[in-house]
Image (cartoon, rainbow, N blue to C red):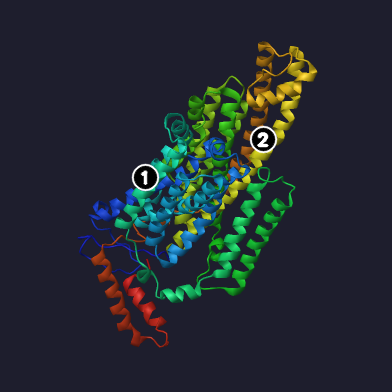
């Protein structure tokens, strides 16, 4: 049965009502107007700006950063470590905050982001910047955990709406990140460092708000264990096998084709070792059957929940894949204007974020299964149709792309929230959302790898097929074709023998057409990812019974928490003689049933 924890209407700052967790209670009338709730909302909003900005602002200008601090071939690690830490951090934050309480994870996580931003702003080398991004990536796993940190503070029926509304704050960085970054470079003396100055500000404000206003259930209120018992009982081996396996596997995928060739022993070795580690984790947890495993395997016996997180990963695969492909298409085919192109390149991410925001309405639009099927069918059709792209129909492509991404984003937003609703025990909301987010990251990494490899392979075919014949037909000597192909990368044709303005124009058009042919393949590939959602959606969970007024946790002021804890201890002590076990476990169980103390 889902745990709930709410108070009867009354004075929020003075009253403490303990209720049976099986009962549905009303939230105090002034709960949403209370400074703790309002301040926490502010903390979540600003944290989301920081969490999305750490990657979205830096990724478009990595070459500029490398030119300033390098050149260093390791500059690709700036983005890689951020996403790797993010994927692993979700499980750590979700599970440990379930077991120990959330407050210090969110205060500490944002503090980590502040330190990371300071390190990056003062970086004098690529190595410094990589180190700072390790901290920023870990912080982002806290800062983007909206589905459980806000979801547990409101009635379950409002979780869709709350998640959708808060994603408005992802718009500045997730949508307009490239435009903001290029503006910093072009219009400030500090250039790209202003990315991290901005993150210092947002992380500093967010940390302050978390520290002052965020007071969810504490360690004493959610567990009967002592802190030392929690340390002794921690699943250290499971932690190493699961987090280590995920990290090593993702590193292998991320290295392939960028840091090392795909056939490299590093790439193959890391992928294989990562997979073996994850298999070993499953075997270990099944054998040990620990009371508090790092990832409770019984979550995966809930098939509708598993289907939901798989759908979420497939939808996210389009978001991350297009975030890489679309900017290349914009600047490679349609424009060389940095300012204009950076705005156009935001089209796919803007559509996705809009879709996530609109998913806040999911509760009001009928069974979620049919919503997912309709959105998947429309999104598949529209994004597949982007394969009609030519060198001259940018507006048509953008119309199809943005609309298709809105429907795909709706799927992603709905399934993110559903990962917190479809579980059997709401005391595991953090790890349920964390596993879903990590699965999303793994799926997105795999899909992005497929997109990038496919694009590279197609370009290796289309460019030789289209560009040299066009140049020969235009009159360029065969001996100059290789020089011309190299000049296409730099845009400087002065050293190419026999070249004329007409030949340059012909060669550029052929090169653009070759890129269009390659990009078309990418959109055909997207059909496989998004189209499979149509079938999986038939197995989506039925959330009708979850749309209740039940609340997972409430924020409490200092006096209220003290009274609550004193009442818990008094009742547990009073219940101890009833227990027949020496450890007092039965007495604690009876006390918890009376108090609803397990938030």
Crowding around mark 2 (Cα neighbors within 10 Å: few <14, some 14 to 19, many 20+) is many
Q: Which mark is residue 102?
A: none
Query: What residue occupies the far front of the structure in this picture?
Result: 124
Q: Residue at x 66, y 33 (%)?
A: 521
Is any part of residue 575 visible from this angle?
Answer: yes
Compare residues 576 and 292 and report the one nearer the observer: 292
Is any part of residue 360 visible from this angle?
Answer: no
**How far is disc 1 from disc 2 in space, using C-alphas?**
38 Å
Q: Position of residue 59 (x, y in %)?
A: 53, 40
Q: Quadrant of the C terminus?
A: bottom left
Indicate the quadrant where residue 360 lies.
Answer: top left
Q: Position of residue 537 (x, y in %)?
A: 55, 47
Q: Is residue 5 left or right of residue 421?
A: left
Indicate the quadrant where residue 24 lies.
Answer: bottom left
Q: Position of residue 508 (x, y in %)?
A: 66, 19
Q: Is residue 571 left or right of residue 391?
A: left
| Marks 1, 2: nearer the viewer | 1
**Secondary structure category for the residue under label 1:** helix
Tally the numbered discs.
2
Q: Are marks 1 and 2 in contact (CB under 8 Å)?
A: no
Q: Which residue is mark 2?
A: 455
Q: Residue at x 43, y 33 (%)?
A: 189
Decide: is 29 above or below 317.
below
Q: Which residue is mark 1?
A: 201
Decide: is 244 above or below 164.
below
Q: Is residue 498 left or right of residue 419?
A: right
Indicate the quadrant where residue 8 lies.
Answer: bottom left
């Amino acid at each position: 049965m889902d745990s709930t924890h709410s108070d009867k209407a009354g004075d929020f700052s003075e009253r403490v009502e303990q209720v049976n967790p099986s009962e549905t209670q009303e939230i105090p009338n002034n709960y949403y107007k209370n400074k703790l709730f309002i301040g926490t909302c502010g903390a979540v909003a600003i944290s989301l700006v920081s969490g999305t900005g750490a990657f979205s602002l830096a990724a478009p200008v990595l070459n500029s950063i490398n030119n300033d601090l390098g050149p260093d071939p390791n500059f690709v690690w700036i983005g890689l470590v951020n996403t790797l830490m993010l994927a692993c951090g979700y499980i750590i934050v979700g599970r440990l905050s379930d077991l120990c309480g959330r407050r210090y994870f969110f205060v500490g996580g944002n503090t980590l982001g502040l330190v990371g931003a300071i390190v990056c702003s003062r970086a004098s080398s690529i190595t410094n910047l990589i180190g700072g991004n390790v901290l920023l990536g870990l912080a982002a796993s806290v800062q983007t955990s909206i589905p459980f940190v806000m979801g547990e503070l409101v009635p379950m029926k409002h979780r869709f709406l709350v998640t959708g509304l808060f994603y408005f704050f992802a718009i500045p960085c997730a949508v307009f990140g490239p435009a903001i970054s290029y503006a910093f470079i072009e219009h400030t003396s500090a250039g790209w460092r202003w990315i991290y100055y901005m993150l210092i500000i947002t992380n500093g404000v967010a940390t302050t708000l978390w520290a002052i206003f965020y007071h969810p259930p504490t360690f004493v209120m959610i567990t009967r264990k002592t802190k030392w018992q929690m340390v002794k009982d921690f699943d250290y081996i499971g932690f190493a096998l699961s987090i280590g396996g995920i990290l090593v596997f993702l590193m292998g995928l991320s290295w392939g084709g960028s840091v090392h060739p795909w056939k490299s022993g590093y790439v193959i070795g890391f992928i294989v070792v990562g997979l073996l580690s994850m298999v070993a984790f499953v075997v270990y947890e099944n054998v040990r059957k620990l009371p508090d495993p790092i990832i409770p395997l019984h979550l995966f016996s809930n098939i509708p929940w598993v289907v939901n997180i798989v759908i979420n990963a497939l939808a996210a695969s389009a978001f991350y894949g297009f975030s890489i492909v679309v900017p290349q298409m914009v600047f490679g085919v349609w424009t060389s204007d940095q300012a204009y192109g950076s705005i156009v390149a935001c089209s796919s991410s803007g559509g996705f974020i809009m879709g996530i925001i609109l998913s806040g309405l999911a509760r009001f639009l009928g069974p979620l299964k049919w919503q997912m099927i309709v959105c998947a069918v429309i999104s598949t059709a529209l994004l597949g149709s982007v394969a009609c792209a030519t060198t001259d129909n940018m507006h048509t492509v953008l119309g199809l792309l943005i609309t298709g991404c809105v429907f795909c984003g709706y799927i992603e937003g709905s399934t993110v929230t559903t990962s917190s609703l479809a579980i059997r025990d709401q005391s595991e909301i953090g790890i349920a959302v964390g596993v879903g987010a990590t699965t999303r990251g793994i799926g997105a990494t795999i899909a992005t790898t497929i997109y990038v490899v496919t694009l590279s392979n197609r370009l290796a075919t289309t460019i030789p097929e289209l560009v040299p014949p066009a140049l020969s037909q235009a009159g360029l000597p065969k001996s100059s074709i290789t020089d011309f192909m190299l000049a296409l990368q730099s845009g400087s044709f002065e050293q190419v023998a026999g070249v004329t303005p007409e030949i340059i124009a012909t060669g550029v058009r052929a090169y653009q057409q070759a890129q269009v042919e390659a990009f078309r393949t990418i959109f055909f590939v997207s059909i496989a990812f998004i189209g499979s959602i149509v079938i999986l959606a038939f197995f989506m969970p039925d959330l009708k019974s979850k749309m209740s007024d039940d609340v997972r946790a409430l924020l409490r002021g200092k006096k209220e928490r003290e009274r609550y804890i004193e009442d818990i201890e008094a009742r547990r002590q009073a219940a101890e003689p009833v227990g027949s076990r020496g450890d007092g476990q039965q007495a604690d169980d009876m006390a918890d049933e009376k108090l609803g103390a397990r938030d």
